Each structure stands twice: as C-alpha cells, then as structure tokens.
Image (cartoon, rainbow, N blue to C red):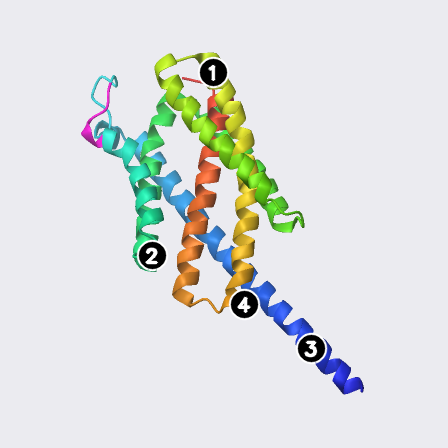
Amino acid sequence: MDYQNYSRETKISLPYTGEQTTVKNFMANVFSYMFLALGVSALMAYLFSSNPILLSYLINETHTGLNMLGYVVMFAPLGFVLLMSFGYARLSAPVLMLLFIVYAAITGISFSFIFLAYTSGSILACFLSASVMFGVMAVMGYTTQKDLTSFGRIMMMGLIGIIIASLVNLFLKNGTMDYIISFIGVMVFTGLTAYDVQKLKRIGEGIESEGTPAVEVKKRSIMGALSLYLDFINLFLMLLRLFGRRN
C-alpha cells in the first residue's frame, strides 16, 4: 500500500516539476533574448551619439534635418516588426533571431537622436526608472494567480488610443495633449508588461503538454522577447517624454 501511494504521488508530482522546469527555461530564454536586444540597442545608441562621423550619416552638417539614412533608421523598425509578425510561420528561427538583432540595432541607432535632445543624466534616470517599473510588473505578471486577459484587452485598447491620439497630435502639436498621451502611455506599457509576462508564462506551460518542437519553442521565445522589448522601450520613451530634461 505504501508503495502504491508513493507511486501515485510520484506520478502526480513529476509532470508538475517537468512543466515548471519547462516554463522557467522558456522564460529564461525570452528574457535572455530581450536583454541581448537591449544591449545591442544601447551599444548602437552610444556609438552613433558619441561619434560625429557616424552621426553625420544620419543628420546633415547643420543638425537641422535628416539625411537619407536618418529617415531609413526612423521608419525601418516598424517594417521589421511587421515582417517578423506576419512572416512568423514562414521564417526559420535563425532568420527570426537575425531580424530581431538587426531591428534592435536600428532602433538603437535611432535612439542616438535622444542624446541630442535630452541630457545624459535625465536619460539615465528614466532608463533606471523604466527598469525598476518593468521588473516589478514582470514579477507581478509571473507570480499573480489572477487572470489578466481582460486587463490586457483594456491595455490594448489604451494602446490603440495612444497611437490615434499621437497621430492627431502630429498635426496639432499640442504640448498639453502630448503630456497626457505620455502619462497614459506609462500606465499602458506598465500594464502590458504584466499581461505579456503572464501570457508568455502560459505559453511556456503549454509547451510541455503540447509536445511543441524545439524549433517552434525557440521561435516563440524570440517573439516573446520582441513583445517585452517593445514594452520596455516604449515605457522608457514615455517616461523620457514626461520627465526628460532637454539640452
């Protein structure tokens, strides 16, 4: 009888342990890819902002307008995100990873403009603030037992509202509206961080039970890293728009 009870307990506990290990490995890969992308972005931003020769490829000599490469750098990141999202099924894991790294590099180059507009101290302060807020919400999203699906829908509606309002304000150029958009943006991307982490955790939980192939697991981890990268970057930019001190 004791052996039978031990067998039942073993059969119950082993799948759970295996599932938890799979989830942890999946989330570790997601965050590893995300941190790699952030490192690439930070390196490229520093190189271009600190090197006048590299910066001259983006901005004309009088710093009053962009060169052709500058416009490419400004608009190319959106194209990479769309390519990765809509081409997910057809692209291999190595190609997805390459696109992600190139996207992070181009995004970093575009961030070199930030160093021209804001002081280094305020950029660092906003980056550290974004890191703390992102970390707290990531832990909450991973550990909470509450389903954040409906909360995520609200955040997505808020994101759509931010995009529409930002497009409108491109023509209005209203400072007060820009402040409101940035304030709401901080709340939206903070909330999306928790929602996305929980969603990724559930994807990790399904990998073991579904018997997902290793290649597919890697592709999902890359796309998960992309979503968290976007959450962090946009949270940082919104904080910078709110609290950054201009040169």
Discs 3/4, front: 4
**Magenta stretch bounds:** 65-69
Q: Is residue 62 left or right of residue 34?
A: left
Q: Position of residue 223 (x, y in %)?
A: 41, 51
| Point 42% across, 28% down: residue | 163
Q: In the visual, does 217 lie left or right of 17?
A: left
Chain-order first, disc 1 or disc 2? 2
In whole angstroms, how far apart are the C-alphas of marks 2 and 4?
Answer: 21 Å
In three-dimensional space, the C-alpha distance between marks 4 and 1, rounded to whole angstroms, equals 48 Å
First in residue order: circle 1 vs circle 3: 3
Which residue is tagged 3? 10
- Front-lying residue, 39 or 92: 92
- The first of marks 4 and 1 along the sequence is 1
Q: How many marks?
A: 4
Q: Residues within 10 Å of mark 2 (few under 14, many from 20)?
A: few
SS at badge 2: loop
Return the residue at label 1. Answer: 177
Q: Residue at x 44, y 26 (%)?
A: 120
Q: Amino acid at mark 3?
A: Thr
Q: Are marks 1 and 2 in contact (CB under 8 Å)?
A: no
